[in-house]
Image (cartoon, rainbow, N blue to C red):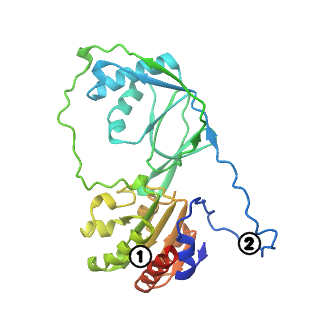
Amino acid sequence: MKIATAASAASALKPSPQPTSLPRNPAPSPPLSSSARKPKLSPAKPTRNTGKVVRIEHALLSPYTPDGYTAALQQFIAAESPDTIVFPHTYQVRDYAPALAACLGRVLIGDVTAINDGPVFVRSLMQGRLSGSYKSAGAPSLISVQSGAFRAEETQSSPAEISTFTPTIEASQIRTRPGEPFRGTAQTVDLGSAPMIVAVGRGIREEGNLNLVQDLAASIGAELAASRPICDNGWLPIERQVGSSGQTVAPKLYLAVGISGAIQHLVGMKGSQCIVAINKDPEAPIFEVADYGIVGDLFEVVPALTEALKSAKG
């Protein structure tokens, strides 16, 4: 972690047309010679080739029912014999994927946050206090991955084969009748897709001080987020909460203001590419995961940082 002043942090936070990921706890760099200061070409980003895309189509798959999805996917898996089936860890997947796993005689490893060699699947336990490692015996492996836990890789531009799979489903197999779909509020925020986030914690003291971080977020075009105490007090809506009981995010920049770094919050943002922390306590746990740390009173640092960022943008 690097300790920075408000002025130096402003230059680090200035939006760049080619943002880069900063390593955790980087070692000090030696002085650069004039020749070493020449710009270097960025290494090529890893790419993946999408070999085939399959559309599963049947009239009884709309509207969604767990019975319909389970029957369709069971037939598709039997036809394709995949080694691993990966789902997003959504409410809908949690509705039908366990039943699908049971029909296949397999176990669903849910809410995966990392995949190690083996493959070994890692998931959080006890609200992020512990991590469990799981290895599937045989194939296929069924896993669901936590939102924001993995960064997307670029795909090659070569065209993929597109085919259609039509399962055999009888109306008698559908045992449920769906009701009206849930409609979220118009103000619902998807923090998982935000490239930059400014998050505020209990260090802000009172609701009336939120305008400080709101101005900071606006100066860099970032979304505003919060730790659980802020949302529990009703100062910000629950959809802006980051952590084990909120959203999991992995933005290019995560600026934590007045957040001590409880484990429940860290599990929701530790995958961010660059973490900047502002806290007056130099021993705050948030600094253990931060790339840059500003030790100081947020009521002095944040206004100065906001002004520096506005000046840098001209």
**Alpha carbon separation for disc pair 1 and 2:** 29 Å
User: Looking at numbered disc 1 in the image, what kind of residue is underneath it?
Assistant: Gly
Q: Residues within 10 Å of mark 2 (few under 14, many from 20)?
A: few
**Whole-percent x, y for residue 147 in the image:** 43, 48
* Camera-side mark, 1 or 2: 2
Give the residue displayed 43% in from the left and 56% down from the top.
Answer: 194
**Whole-percent x, y for residue 228 in the image:** 33, 65
Marks 1 and 2, the one that precedes in the sequence: 2
The quarter of the picture where residue 16 lies is bottom right
**Whole-percent x, y for residue 273 in the image:** 55, 59
Q: Quadrant of the N terminus?
A: bottom right
Give the residue displayed 21% in from the left and 38% down from the top.
Answer: 181
Q: Which residue is mark 2?
A: 29
Count the marks: how many? 2
Can the viewer see residue 139 in this picture?
no
Is residue 28 shown left or right of residue 104? Answer: right
Is residue 278 shown left or right of residue 135? Answer: left
152 up-or-down from 249: above or below? above
Give whichever of 287, 302 is nearer the camera.
302
267 up-or-down from 73: above or below? below
Q: Secondary structure at mark 2?
A: loop
Can the viewer see residue 8 in this picture?
yes
**Whole-percent x, y for residue 153 in the image:** 57, 44
Q: Which residue is mark 1?
A: 258
30 up-or-down from 151: above or below? below
Give whichever of 33, 188 is nearer the camera.
33
User: Looking at numbered disc 2 in the image, what kind of residue is underneath it?
Assistant: Ser
Is residue 242 shown left or right of residue 131? Answer: left
